[in-house]
Amino acid sequence: MIFIVSSVPAKYIPSYKIFHYDKLFHISLFLIFGVLVYNALEPYSHKNSFSWARILFSISVVILYGVLDEIHQGYVPGRTIDMWDAIADTIGGVLAGLIVYLRYIPRRTASKIQ
């Protein structure tokens, strides 16, 4: 979905007021992407367990894809490479890591008590 949307030439993108919040869209989209990457790697690790390696790998994938997506947009007619978009993508990936971490805190605390 990200690749398809970033492949649309600028002349076909409507200029609605809502697009003034495009950094929030980047953060939200890449946050969801980060959580999905983390969850997609679960079959390769212990079920319902937290893994720092998995979370760091997920954040790295999100950051790398965000940077590559910006480079890709440089080749789309009317689109440009925007460093601030890549930074917003990175923030989304880091927030995804934080959300995943916070999701596992109650489970880790409960297992230590028992």
Image: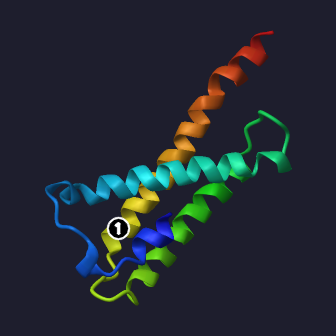
- Name the residue tied to disc 1: 85
Give the x, y percent position of residue 4. Answer: 47, 71
Kind of residue at disc 1: Asp
Q: Residue lying farthest top?
A: 114
Residue 20 at x, y = what percent? 18, 59
Describe residue 14's horizontal placement relative to residue 114 as left or right: left
Residue 32 or residue 97, whichever sits in front = 32
Name the residue rendered at 30%, 82% in the picture: 79
Residue 11 location, quadrant: bottom left
**Closer to the camera in the image, 109 or 44:** 44
The 10 Å Cα crowd at callout 1, few under 14, some 14 to 19, many 20 or more, is many
The extreme front residue here reads: 12
> Which residue occupies 42% across, 55% down?
91
Residue 53 at x, y percent in the picture: 73, 52
- Relative to residue 49, is residue 23 depicted above or below? below
Work out which residue is located at the far left of the displayed protein and give it.
Answer: 17
Question: Which residue is drawn at the image coordinates 81% and 9% (left, top)?
Answer: 114
Horizontal arrangement in the rendering, residue 11 relative to residue 38 (left or right): left
Secondary element type, mark 1: helix
Residue in the image at 34% along x and 81% along y: 81
Identify which residue, 63 or 15, lies in the foreground.
15
x, y percent for residue 94 = 50, 51
Quarter occupied by residue 15: bottom left
In this figure, what is the number of numbered marks? 1
Q: In the displayed structure, does residue 56 sit left or right of residue 94? A: right
The answer to whether 57 appears left or right of 13 in the picture is right
